[in-house]
Image (cartoon, rainbow, N blue to C red):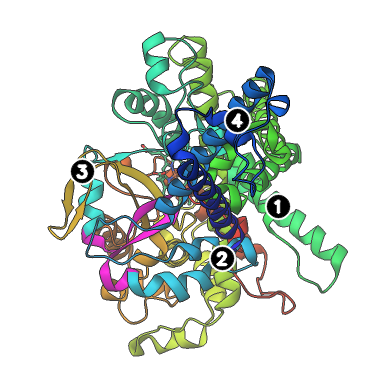
Amino acid sequence: MDSPGVSGICCQKGMLGCARVRSTYYCLVGPMRSSVNPASILWHPRGHKRSVFFPKSEQPTSRKMVMHGLCIIIGKALAVGILFLSICIFSRIVPPRFPRNIPAVPFWVTLLSLVRDIDQEDIYRRHIQKPLQTHGAIKIFFAGQWNLLIQRSSYLNEIFRNEDVYQKSGNQKKIPHSVLAEFLGRFPVSPSVALLLTLGPKGDNVISSRGTTWRLYRDIITPGLQGHFDAGLIAANAEELCSSLLAFQNTVGNCGVPVQNLLQQFTIANVSQKPTKGDESSLHQLQLAVKREIFKPIFMNFPVLDRLGKLIPCRVRARNVVEQFSAALQYGVRHGQGTPNASNLGARLMAARDGGVLTGKQFRDNLNVLFVAGQENPQLLLISMLYLLAKHPVSVSCPLKSMELMSQDVQSRLRREIDACSTLDPSNVAFSELPYLTCVIYESLRLLPPISQLINRRTSQDVILGNQIYIPKGTYVGYNCYSTNRDPAVWGPTADEFRPERWGQSNTEISQCYRQRRARAEFVSFHGGSRACLGEKFALLEARVALFVLVSRLSWSLDPEWPDRKTPVSRVCNS
Ligand code: HEM
């Protein structure tokens, strides 16, 4: 963990030492400067300062003197460069002065994942939870800079409502030279140059853009995400998923079955609006490779390394994988067999590009980001739901008046609710018939939000958050969803427990609770304000249909051999 810092400091010391030697040298010869060429002095080997004057025969030739002069210039440039780099590194490591009245998580916490395989949960509990819950906000180092991380709902509400002050700012602006930025919509040259010269296709994407560009993307995308979805297709894909899981289980016998790959193929098929056929696996494999390459902790924490371009072979590989993935995705959308439906998301993006409304680059960047958001987040939600069902078979929070529930585990209760529905076809069932199932989904989203921490905004001016925290212009601001969703001040002493019942009993109660918690920014899994997730409706439908099928057809338990832990930090994406 310490090695980058240590080597940085060594470098600095080395250069400072060197500079001192040289200045002493000049000092010694100072009085003679008028009669001695300084180049000849430096030419002389160190330690023989007295024989500064050469005998005529040994005097350096003019060629040697030129070479010598060059050495001095290069040496000076190097010294200045290293000094500058050291100052940069140092100024990065030290937390900024403002905001003054909130603590900073020590810089080294960010580097923990570089030295050992550590669970996110452990880092959160040991280093982040307490200061965050006490102060409602902290300073934290991430992606090569210090950021403000918010937890308190009232602060978050203020941020969500003030898009003009807390402006969306994605990775392509925050770390424009990174491979991640390239993946999600980096400008080929700096935005200002691109604007001036109007050359180079413009990029950006619906999640990170602002103003008219964002509205343009949103208007193209929204009908594809909020129209009518084919729940029958999702149900058929869920049946297919169950069959694959069962087949897998039969091959491994009594052992646990890893579910993530199959769940991801399921969500890929759904967002592509086509039946699962197994051909998702190539995109799936490419996407795994992209994630593996992009989210290496060393490059996430020090994205400046991405500037070294071809000098780091694994970054060359990362860029190639990103290109391959993007090309495969575009090919899939153009030639795939998705539902031939004009409201299909891919079809809408393609029409916008073919009609000249979007440039090729805008098409590519939006496609990349929508594909990732559209299947990665639902897949994470599904895996969290299954994990929580398997881990908490007994419903712990039944009020005394409903003692009957005490003896039921969550899965049995879900099954009873499903069996009592007017139809066993999930594509035809009215979800108002499944209040408990809805609670299980909300509770899973609350406890294990797919995007647990997000740093996605930048202040456009100096501002005082909640009349308490002075934030200078240009500060990156984000939030820790995991912590906000579990804030005991809001959710009570059972905030860390899986209690689906907390959302209510009847449909009216549940939807009112959900709306209120979202409006007060107490439940922020789908972000909030005008920039809330556009795919929420689709994601919830997919989760309902999938849970319906997965619970009515299969029973879920944790493999006792599996070490119960969340994702290691080194495998996690943050924004
Ligand atoms: C459980 C599933 C999902 C969760 C928890 C989730 C969460 C989020 C979050 C936290 C944001 C804010 C991101 C940021 O500011 O950087 C967001 C934005 C967005 N999400 Fe989702 N998402 C989910 C599913 C989806 C799906 C299925 C789609 C559809 C393809 C989608 C499309 C979008 C879009 C387009 C935005 C940008 C909204 C805007 O800025 O106007 N999401 N989502």
Q: Which residue in the structure is indicated by mark 4?
A: 40
Q: Is residue 50 left or right of residue 559?
A: left
**What's the amino acid at mark 4?**
Ser
Q: Is residue 51 left or right of residue 246?
A: left
**Measured Cα–Cα span from mark 1 to mark 2:** 31 Å
Q: Is residue 265 left or right of residue 176?
A: right
Measured as percent of width and height from the top left, residue 425 is found at 57, 52
Task: Kindly indicate whether the residue at mark 2 contacts the one at mark 1 (C-beta within 8 angstroms).
Answer: no
- Disc 2 crowd rating (10 Å Cα; few below 14, some 14-19, many 20+) is some
Is residue 272 in view from this perspective? no
Q: Which residue in the structure is indicated by mark 1?
A: 262
- Disc 1 crowd rating (10 Å Cα; few below 14, some 14-19, many 20+) is some
**What's the amino acid at mark 3?**
Asn
| Relative to 296, residue 103 above or below | below
| Relative to 437, residue 231 above or below | above
Mark linked to residue 378 = none
Q: Residue at x 26, y 47 (%)?
A: 160
Along the line of sight, the residue nearer the viewer: 77 or 325: 77
**What's the amino acid at mark 1?**
Leu
Q: Which residue in the structure is indicated by mark 3?
A: 162
- The disc, 2 or 3, on the residue closer to the chain's N-terminal end is 2
Q: Which residue in the structure is indicated by mark 2?
A: 112
Report the mark closest to the observer, 3 or 4. 4
Along the line of sight, the residue nearer the viewer: 110 or 489: 110
- The disc, 3 or 4, on the residue closer to the chain's N-terminal end is 4
Whether the residue under disc 4 has CB within 8 Å of ligand 1: no
